[in-house]
Image (spheres, rainbow, N blue to C red):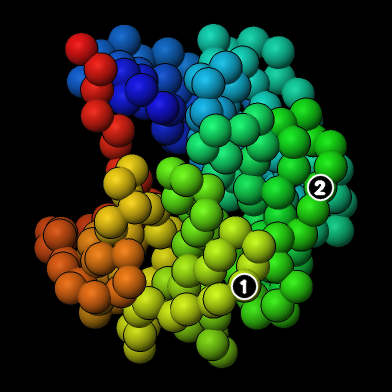
């Protein structure tokens, strides 16, 4: 959260694993060495990293100390995927996506896996949550038919608004630390590119246009000196 370290997923010997490095790319350290693991997110106090692991045929959520020890399983949902965690900005809680394909929704739980609660009673398919710095807004991937777009809602699941209208797909949003912008990936002519827009959906700008897919953007907090 202080912008000094980056946690990311790396393909190591054919299996996704979690790796830490300094913000400048130095001192890479692998912190998982087991089943396929990915999508790390830091707890607000940098104490933990939440992540997803593929086990027994589905995705479950885990927690690991930021130093790479004390792995703890948080979800036990054999009939659905629990994945795409996103830490609460100032509480020891984590938002995440849970459900079977086509019936996913957004949930929140304590950082020890207790007090699981569904965020919204609206039955719209909701995936890949991102939380604003004041925890008042949730951006997510929403679906109309097979295509996904970026939506935003209040933290109680109310006031859902559609922000993009891409005839292909948009996904994996992230909200800037000043609550002014949302970055996301969008499919353009069969290739994923990175976009940015105002938090109300206006002024969309494509940021990348190079061969290959660009996806899963996140904002970086200002580095403390």
Above/below status of 30 relative to 210: above
In which quarter of the view is residue 107 placed?
bottom right
The label number, if any, that marks residue 14 in the structure image = none
Expressed as whole percent of the image width and height from the top left, the position of residue 50 reads 61, 32
Rendered-image quadrant of the N terminus: top left
In which quarter of the view is residue 63 placed?
top right
Element type where label 1 sits in the image: loop
Above/below status of 174 relative to 112: below
82 or 160, which is in the foreground? Answer: 160
* Residue at position x 31%, y 10% in the image: 27
The residue pinned by badge 1 equals: 158
Expressed as whole percent of the image width and height from the top left, the position of residue 49 reads 57, 26
Above/below status of 103 relative to 196: below
Q: Are marks 2 and 1 in contact (CB under 8 Å)?
A: no
| First-in-chain label (2 vs 1) | 2
In which quarter of the view is residue 105 placed?
bottom right
Question: Which mark is in front, 2 or 1?
Answer: 1
222 sits to left or right of 75? left
124 or 202, which is in the foreground? Answer: 202
The residue pinned by badge 2 equals: 116
* Residue at position x 42%, y 72% in the image: 150
Expressed as whole percent of the image width and height from the top left, the position of residue 142 reads 53, 75
* Residue at position x 55%, y 33% in the image: 90
Rendered-image quadrant of the C terminus: top left
Above/below status of 185 relative to 75: below
23 sits to left or right of 34? left
Residue 217 visible somewhere in the drawing: no
Element type where label 2 sits in the image: loop
Q: Residues within 10 Å of mark 2 (few under 14, many from 20)?
A: some
């Amino acid at each position: 959260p202080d912008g000094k370290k980056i946690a990311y997923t790396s393909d190591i010997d054919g299996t996704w694993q979690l790796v830490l490095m300094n913000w400048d790319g130095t001192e890479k350290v692998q912190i998982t060495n087991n089943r396929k693991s990915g999508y790390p997110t830091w707890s607000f106090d940098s104490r933990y990293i939440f992540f997803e692991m593929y086990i027994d045929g589905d995705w479950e959520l885990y927690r690991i100390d930021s130093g790479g020890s004390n792995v703890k399983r948080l979800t036990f949902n054999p009939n659905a995927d629990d994945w795409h965690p996103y830490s609460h900005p100032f509480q020891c809680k984590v938002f995440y996506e849970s459900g079977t394909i086509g019936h996913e929704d957004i949930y929140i739980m304590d950082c020890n896996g207790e007090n699981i609660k569904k965020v919204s009673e609206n039955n719209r398919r909701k995936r890949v949550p991102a939380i604003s710095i004041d925890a008042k807004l949730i951006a997510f991937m929403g679906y109309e038919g097979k295509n996904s777009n970026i939506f935003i809602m209040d933290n109680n699941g109310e006031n859902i608004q559609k922000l993009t209208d891409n005839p292909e797909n948009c996904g994996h949003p992230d909200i800037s630390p000043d609550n002014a912008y949302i970055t996301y990936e969008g499919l353009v002519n069969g290739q994923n590119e990175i976009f940015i827009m105002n938090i109300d959906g206006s002024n969309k700008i494509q940021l990348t246009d190079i061969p290959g897919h660009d996806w899963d953007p996140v904002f970086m907090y200002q580095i403390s000196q």
